[in-house]
Amino acid sequence: MNPVSQMHVAVIQYFSGEKRESVLFIAAGVLAIIASVVLLWKGSPLRGMAYPLIAIALIQLVVGWTVFARTDGQTRSLHTHLQGDPGGYAAAELARMDKVQRSFQIYKVIEIVLMAAGVAGLFLLRDRQTLYAVSRGLALQAGLMLAFDLAAERRADIYVNAIRTLGRALEENR
């Protein structure tokens, strides 16, 4: 298979994974909101969990829907660019993915800090029911977001390697 055809496959694989994960983001957000409504409605002692669950669920819904809605068009555009100008595609997509990968570094730090704060609260705030429950919700949602972002980061690394392979192949064929 020629390098451009291989890159078309890599685009499909990467963006199919992005779209699948966006559905998981949306599902996690919906489930967190449902759980929050139940916790609040039943007056559960853990109702404080609802605050971080809802706050992060809103992020999950917005990010999930944004990625889901834009992926097909973005994929078509990238295929067109790749077909017409493989070298230009590689340069532009590497620059874009560099920003994406830097964003993952920021997200990971934030998620780890939030998860650590939640876990610390589980140990330090046992006697403060609402803050203990907030800590549980925060640790849960931050951990889930970290897991999602680690999977996305890995997918991005594979995609970037495919772009670099394309770039090297194009250089060799000059």
Image (cartoon, rainbow, N blue to C red):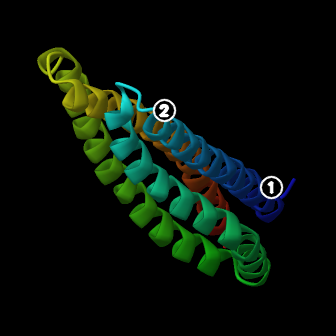
Which sits in the foreground, 157 or 28?
28
Q: Which residue is mark 1?
A: 9
User: Which of 21 and 55 lies nearest the eye of the viewer?
Assistant: 55
Please tell me whether mark 1 sits on a helix, a strand or a loop: helix
**Residue shown at 23% from the left, 19% from the top:** 122
Q: Is residue 173 visible?
A: no
Please state the horizontal and vertical placement of residue 38, each as a whole percent of the image. 53, 36
Amino acid type at mark 1: Val
Q: Earlier in the sequence, mark 1 or mark 2?
A: 1
* Residue at image point 46% right, 34% down: 39
Q: Nearer the viewer, residue 104 or 93?
A: 104
Label tally: 2
How many residues crowd around disc 1 within 10 Å: few (fewer than 14), some, or many (20 or more)? few
Q: Residue 133 lies in what quarter of the image?
A: top left
Say what amino acid the circle numbered 2 marks. Answer: Lys
Residue 89 seen from this side: yes
Left/right placement of residue 158 relative to residue 50 reads right
Q: Residues within 10 Å of mark 2 (few under 14, many from 20)?
A: few
The residue indicated by pointer 2 is 42
Q: Position of residue 102 (x, y in %)?
A: 35, 57
Task: Describe residue 125's horizontal placement relative to residue 19 as left or right.
Answer: left
Residue 47 against residue 11 in the figure, above or below? above
Q: Is residue 39 above or below residue 52?
A: above
Question: How far apart are labels 1 and 2 at the CA level?
Answer: 49 Å
Quarter of the image holding residue 151?
Answer: top right
Question: From what the image shows, is residue 154 above or below residue 78?
Answer: above
Percent across and percent down for residue 166 are: 66, 60
Q: Is residue 15 left or right of residue 143?
A: right
SS state under label 2: loop
Q: Residue placed at 53% from the left, 46% from the top?
A: 33
Which of 17/166 is in front?
17
For the C terminus, the quadrant is bottom right
